[in-house]
Amino acid sequence: MRVRGGREARGNISVPVLAAVYIGTVVGAGFASGQEILQFFGSHGPRGLAALAVATASLGLFGYLLLRASARLRAESHAVVLRYVAGPVVGRVIDLVLTFFLFGGTAAMLAGAGATLQQEFALPYWIGLVGMALATVLTVLFGIGAVVRSVSVIVPFLLAAVLAVATATVVARPPDLTFTAPARAAVGHWAVSGVAYGSYNLILSASVLVPIARLTPRARLGPGAFLGALGLGLGALAVNLAILSHAPDSAAAEVPMVLAARLLSPAAGLAYSVVLLAEVYTTAVGSLFGFANRLVGEESPYFKALVIGGAAAATVAGAAGFSTIVGTLYPAVGYAGFLLLGALALAWLKGRL
């Protein structure tokens, strides 16, 4: 996304496109599997709906502030924005958190493949784990072009599948809004859970939102951020209600949304499993590429070795299990992301945005 002149740097990105990019960076395999929605919202029962509202507001407000900072600096990299709003020390800490999350996200996706194949096809967990690692490495070694193509093809199908299964499930079986599962909650308090969900997703989105802000008129930044946050909130609500429709069985499943799809019909379960595996693949590809590219750069002679070594390490980490990784890694990154939220809020209050 290189831009040559000042006038060309703005005016190309519309509000719907900006919102779609925001949604696309957040709605990945963790979202579509239902596991992160279960742990951050569904486990809190009725208060999970309030947590969803908090998360939506956080994604809208802080996403807008991040875009404003990016547009002000005309930044091409999230590192520039982090240093500006948080200072060199805290900005570096947030950058390290983001880099670590890219590695952890790779491990989570490999584990997600193992869990899906084990739950739906009774295959050994390690087959999905190792098989997805191999597919991810082969794609990333072909470079950013292969990464972009793999993501752009799958995401629309994923969104359609998520909404179709969630809607059909809620219509067929009303959700149990009284259900709670404190032991499954990633964060103990519902309000903190909502902010943490927004926090880690904002960190995840930063590497994409920052460069795209240069191509968007300032007047569109707010509407785009809040429209994207609203779409994310409604999508998460649909998944949450679908999970609650099959509680408590869904709370015990590694991949709750595949369970919901299978209970609609065996064909729906199979179709959703295939789409989810495809999204696991694209998320793993993006995370592994981002991790290696951030550390050494795609043009580095060490890039391929780091890709292979990173995937091997992620495979070992993925042995911990999908739900365990989601319940441990995502909240930790969310808490660390409070640094970014605080820095953005302080910069805004000081008039620096």
Image (tube, grey):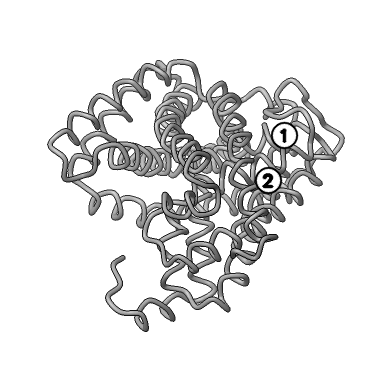
Side (left or right) of 139 relative to 249? left
Q: Position of residue 40 (x, y in %)?
A: 69, 36
Q: CA distance from mark 2 to mark 1?
A: 9 Å
Q: Position of residue 232 (x, y in %)?
A: 62, 55
Q: Secondary structure at mark 2?
A: helix
Residue tagged 1: 246
Q: Secondary structure at mark 1?
A: loop
The residue depicted at 42 percent of the width and 69 percent of the height is 214
Task: Name above or below for residue 163 compared with residue 142.
Answer: below
Q: Amino acid at mark 2?
A: Thr
Crowd class of label 2 (few under 14; some 14 to 19; many from 20; radius 10 Å): many
- The residue at the far bottom in this view is 7
Of mark 2 and mark 1, the one earlier in the sequence is 2
Disc 2 vs disc 1: Cβ atoms closer than 8 Å?
A: yes
Residue 341: give x, y in percent of width and height: 63, 48
Quadrant of res 96: top left
Q: Which quadrant, please, contains the C terminus?
A: bottom right
Give the quadrant of residue 218.
Answer: bottom right
Query: Going by the picture, which residue comes out furthest to the left?
Result: 301
Residue at screen point 24% across, 34% down: 137
Q: Nearer the viewer, residue 324 or 347?
A: 347
Q: Which residue is denoted by mark 2 in the rendering?
A: 169
Circle 1 residues within 10 Å: few <14, some 14–19, many ≥20 = many
Front-lying residue, 257 or 142 = 142
Q: Of 194 and 273, which appears nearest the observer?
A: 194
Most foreground residue, 225 or 184: 225
The residue depicted at 65 percent of the width and 61 percent of the height is 348
Where residue 67 sits: x, y (%)? 53, 63
Against 234, residue 263 (above or below) is above
Name the quadrant containing residue 283.
Answer: top left
Which mark is on residue 12? none
Instruction: Specify the amino acid type for callout 1.
Output: His
